[in-house]
Image (cartoon, helix red, strand yellow):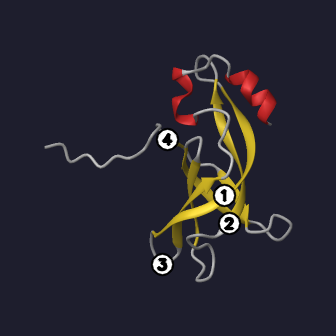
Amino acid sequence: MDTNSERRREQRLRYHWPVWFAEDFNEALSQGQMVDVCSSAAAFTCRTDEHYPYVGQHLTARFSIPRFQPGEAFDMANFTRSGRICRVDDINQFSRRIVVQFAKPLPFKPGEQADSESGIQQELALAV
């Protein structure tokens, strides 16, 4: 019997890069570190705060995603996305792992860049 409980619809891109987030982007921003991202969601770590962030909370995040080029080169594509926190995991007493579901998906699948490069440059130009 296959006990694989994988429910992901697309491959994630795993990388560590700063992410800035807030419930209201006009107020002070908090910093976290990206863990992984797909076109519809992102996971990042941040410092533990007893009141923030929490499941169901809406927040806006600003982050960059590497856009791989032929060879080993890459550029960074910048995004701002709003969404809802769907998961909060305590890592230790100082940090949490946050998963946010985007209200508007990214224009490409970050973890599957090598599989579908055709047309992505046009999609990015329209989305950014």
Kindly check if marks 1 and 2 are in contact, taking CB atoms under 8 A apart as contact.
yes
Q: Label 1: which residue?
A: 83
* Mark 1–mark 3 distance (CA, rounded to whole Å): 25 Å
Q: Which mark is residue 98?
A: none
In contact (CB < 8 Å): disc 1 and disc 3? no
Please state which of the two labelled residues, at mark 4 or mark 1, is closer to the viewer: 1
Indicate the amino acid at tag 3: Gln
Point out the image quarter for the N terminus: top left
Disc 4 to disc 1, C-alpha distance: 18 Å
* Residue named by callout 3: 93
Earlier in the chain: of badge 1 and badge 2, it is 2
Tag of residue 58:
2
Left or right of 39: which side holds 60?
right
In 3D space, how far apart are the residues under numbered discs 1 and 2 (Cα atoms)? 6 Å
Measure how far apart labels 3 and 2 are at the Cα level: 23 Å
**What amino acid type is highlighted by mark number 1?**
Gly
Residue that appears at 68% across and 34% down: 107
Kind of residue indicated by mark 4: Arg
Per the image, the residue denoted by label 4 is 12
